[in-house]
């Protein structure tokens, strides 16, 4: 309500590249992340007239504790699948959020920003 009354605001949701494409053996995860994408697009249409931008970031493989269970071999394989031939850092996501939260993104809404090193093209 505060943003609607102010006729201004930025909402940034976090999904996953698997929400864009689906992942084998990760049906529940992929479905929940796809729901965030649908939520983002619908909310952008609803809140746009109130001057509120709603966007979503869909990270790829990011070097976080979430991936600690994967072997070094698996992580190397994932790295090699991305055209940029590296895995993401938390800072890559933070910088994307910073951009979407800034005035530089004032004409962007309802978009899904894939921050994945080209893993999903």
Image (tube, rainbow, N blue to C red):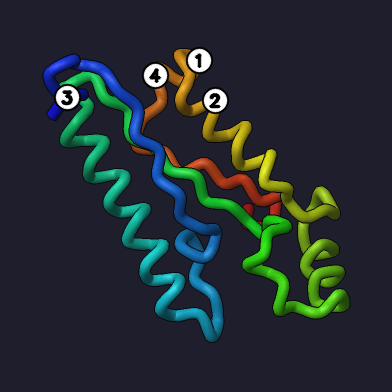
* Measured Cα–Cα span from mark 4 to mark 1: 8 Å
Q: Label 1's element?
A: helix
Quarter occupied by the N terminus: top left
In the rendered image, the vertical position of residue 10 relative to residue 20, given as above or below: above
Kindly identify the residue that appears in the image at 77 percent across and 55 percent down: 87
Alpha carbon distance from label 2 to label 1? 7 Å
Q: Nearer the viewer, mark 3 or mark 2?
A: 3
Numbered label attached to residue 104: 1
In space, the residues marked 1 and 3 are separated at their CA atoms by: 22 Å
Q: Is residue 80 left or right of residue 35?
A: right
Q: Nearer the viewer, residue 120 or 96?
A: 96
Mark nearest the camera among 4 and 3 is 3
The residue at the point 49 percent across, 71 percent down is 22
Viewer-nearest of labels 4 and 1?
1
Residue underneath mark 3: 2
* Cα–Cα gap, marks 4 and 2: 12 Å
| Residue at the image position 87 percent from the left and 78 percent from the top | 73
Dot 4, how many residues are within 10 Å of its Cα: few (below 14), some (14-19), or many (20+)?
A: few
Q: Which residue is mark 4?
A: 107
Residue 31's quadrant in the figure?
bottom left
Q: Is residue 41 above or below residue 106?
A: below
Q: Which residue is mark 2?
A: 99
Name the side, left or right, on which 119 lies relative to 33: right
Q: How far across and how far down the image is residue 10, in percent? A: 35, 27
């Amino acid at each position: 309500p505060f943003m609607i009354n102010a006729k201004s605001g930025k909402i940034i949701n976090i999904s996953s590249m698997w929400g864009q494409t689906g992942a084998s053996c990760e049906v529940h995860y992929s479905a929940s992340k796809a729901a965030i994408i649908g939520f983002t697009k619908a909310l952008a249409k609803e809140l746009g007239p109130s001057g509120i931008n709603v966007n979503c970031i869909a990270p790829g493989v990011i070097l976080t504790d979430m991936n600690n269970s994967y072997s070094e071999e698996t992580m190397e394989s994932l790295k090699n699948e991305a055209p940029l031939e590296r895995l993401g850092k938390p800072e890559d996501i933070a910088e994307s959020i910073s951009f979407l939260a800034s005035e530089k993104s004032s004409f962007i809404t309802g978009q899904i920003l894939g921050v994945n090193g080209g893993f999903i093209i």
